[in-house]
Image (cartoon, rainbow, N blue to C red):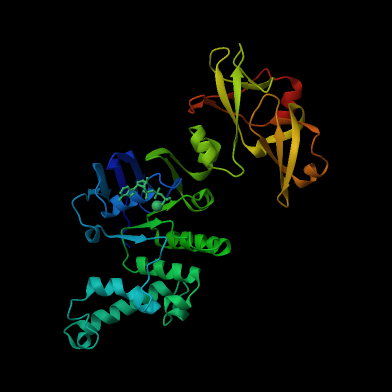
């Protein structure tokens, strides 16, 4: 497998008056699984199509393995695309579907003819090589027993594996996958995710994987690029994205239930004042500055001395429960994720003190600000922070 790095450098693209990509710079290293995560219409597919050469960019460069490929036609770029619709040939068997790309590459027009092709010079040996390569791909994808079926006789997950097989058999420099699992039901999708990741590890393949599903991006990728309205907001490993989002937009996009974003103030010593309470978190900023506090639902814990929350509703998820709460002076519902045992002791209408174990701070405009636990925290709060 020719493994290759993929670089997009300063890519810009307009469709008419709409600027769909603005200065997008992204790099997938050799053998890296890079997810591109973003809401519908943010430009993900356009980006992949530019990479594949199916669409031209207005600005910027595409490099494969360090080489500029802007002038190369799609076929010459040595990339395999796997789309949401698998686009299998319905009248061909699984074997024929997987074999076709190799026949197109390795056989001459004469050698490809059904009967005469076998008699054409060199045809027999080339065909044997193709069969061996197809079988080598089919085995690990567990397609060997399905080779004579047609797509209509396969489950969604099996079809998806055929589409993968067809992409893999060419041994491309990199795979471009555009929402390849969105046709599958929840259970199949979990299995298919695992299969793609296993394939990627086995081949050390470079993959650019487009999805609007944050769970998919977070569970599969080495790094995730979060896109919004044609821009890349942040590129980071999944856990880093979750723990250290660079902006409110990224913080909101990643995590379920979503991060609480609560308007707050800095007091005269730089402490964070939220819902009328001073929290033991400190930031550099002028007194009275309006900021936004970001608190993950799992880091709001019921503790004495916490924020006075009124319980509105308990949402039970089995082992855990999500408390839907109101804070004084805070418009949005605040969510806390707790163990079910804790939720069982609570009833709607009651008050619970909720202490944030970790607070992220953002400027009103949305960019992240530095914020640290304050050394002069009150004893009650220190206890809560442990
Ligand atoms: N050929 C085209 N002509 C005009 N506008 C287009 C064209 N292709 C895409 N667009 C617009 O460009 C924007 C980005 O489209 P794109 O398909 O890249 O989004 P996406 O992130 O893949 O969305 P989705 O998750 O829905 O697939 C959209 O607003 C879309 O309407
Ligand atoms: Mg798309």
Q: Tell how many labels.
A: 0
The answer to which quarter of the image holds residue 171 is bottom left
Is 23 situated above or below 35?
A: above
Q: Is residue 85 visible?
A: yes
Residue at image position (48%, 44%) is 237
Is 167 situated above or below 72?
A: below
Q: Position of residue 292 (x, y in %)?
A: 56, 26
> Is 313 on the left-hand or right-hand side of 57?
right
Q: Is residue 386 visible?
A: no
Q: Quadrant of the C terminus?
A: top right
Q: Quadrant of the N terminus?
A: bottom left
Q: Nearer the viewer, residue 152 or 147?
A: 152
Is 230 situated above or below 131?
A: above
Residue at image position (25%, 45%) is 57
> Is 341 on the left-hand or right-hand side of 69?
right
Residue that sits furthest to the front in the current view: 17
Is 309 situated above or below 110?
A: above
The answer to which quarter of the image holds residue 136 is bottom left
Q: Position of residue 384 (x, y in %)?
A: 73, 29
């Amino acid at each position: 497998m020719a493994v290759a790095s993929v670089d997009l450098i300063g890519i810009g693209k307009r469709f008419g008056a709409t600027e769909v990509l603005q200065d997008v710079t992204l790099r997938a290293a050799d053998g890296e699984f890079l997810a591109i995560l973003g809401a519908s219409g943010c430009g993900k597919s356009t980006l992949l199509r530019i990479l594949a050469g199916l669409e031209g960019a207005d600005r910027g460069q595409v490099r494969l393995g360090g080489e500029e490929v802007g002038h190369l036609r799609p076929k010459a770029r040595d990339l395999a695309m796997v789309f949401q619709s698998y686009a299998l040939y319905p009248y061909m068997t699984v074997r024929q579907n997987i074999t076709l790309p190799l026949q197109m590459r390795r056989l001459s027009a004469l050698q490809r003819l059904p009967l005469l092709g076998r008699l054409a010079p060199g045809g027999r040996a080339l065909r044997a090589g193709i069969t061996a390569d197809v079988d080598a791909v089919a085995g690990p994808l567990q397609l060997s027993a399905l080779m004579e079926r047609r797509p209509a006789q396969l489950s969604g997950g099996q079809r998806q594996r055929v589409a993968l097989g067809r992409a893999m058999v060419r041994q491309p420099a990199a795979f471009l996958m555009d929402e390849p699992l969105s046709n599958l039901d929840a259970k199949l999708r979990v299995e298919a995710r695992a299969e793609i990741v296993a394939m990627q590890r086995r081949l050390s393949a470079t993959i650019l994987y487009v999805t609007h599903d944050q769970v998919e991006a977070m569970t599969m990728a080495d790094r995730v690029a979060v896109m919004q309205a044609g821009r890349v907001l942040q590129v980071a490993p999944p856990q880093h994205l979750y723990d250290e989002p660079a902006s409110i937009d990224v913080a909101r996009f990643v995590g379920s239930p979503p991060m609480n974003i609560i308007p707050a103030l800095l007091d005269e010593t730089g402490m964070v004042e939220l819902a009328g309470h001073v929290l033991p978190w400190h930031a550099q900023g002028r007194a009275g500055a309006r900021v936004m506090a970001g608190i993950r639902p799992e880091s709001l814990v019921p503790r004495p001395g916490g924020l006075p929350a009124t319980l509105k509703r308990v949402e039970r998820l089995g082992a855990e429960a999500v408390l839907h709460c109101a804070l004084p002076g805070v418009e949005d519902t605040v969510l806390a994720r707790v163990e079910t045992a804790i939720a069982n002791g609570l009833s709607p209408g009651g008050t619970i003190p909720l202490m944030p174990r970790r607070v992220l701070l953002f400027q009103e405009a949305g960019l992240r600000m530095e914020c640290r636990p304050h050394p002069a925290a009150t004893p009650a709060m220190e206890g809560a922070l442990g």
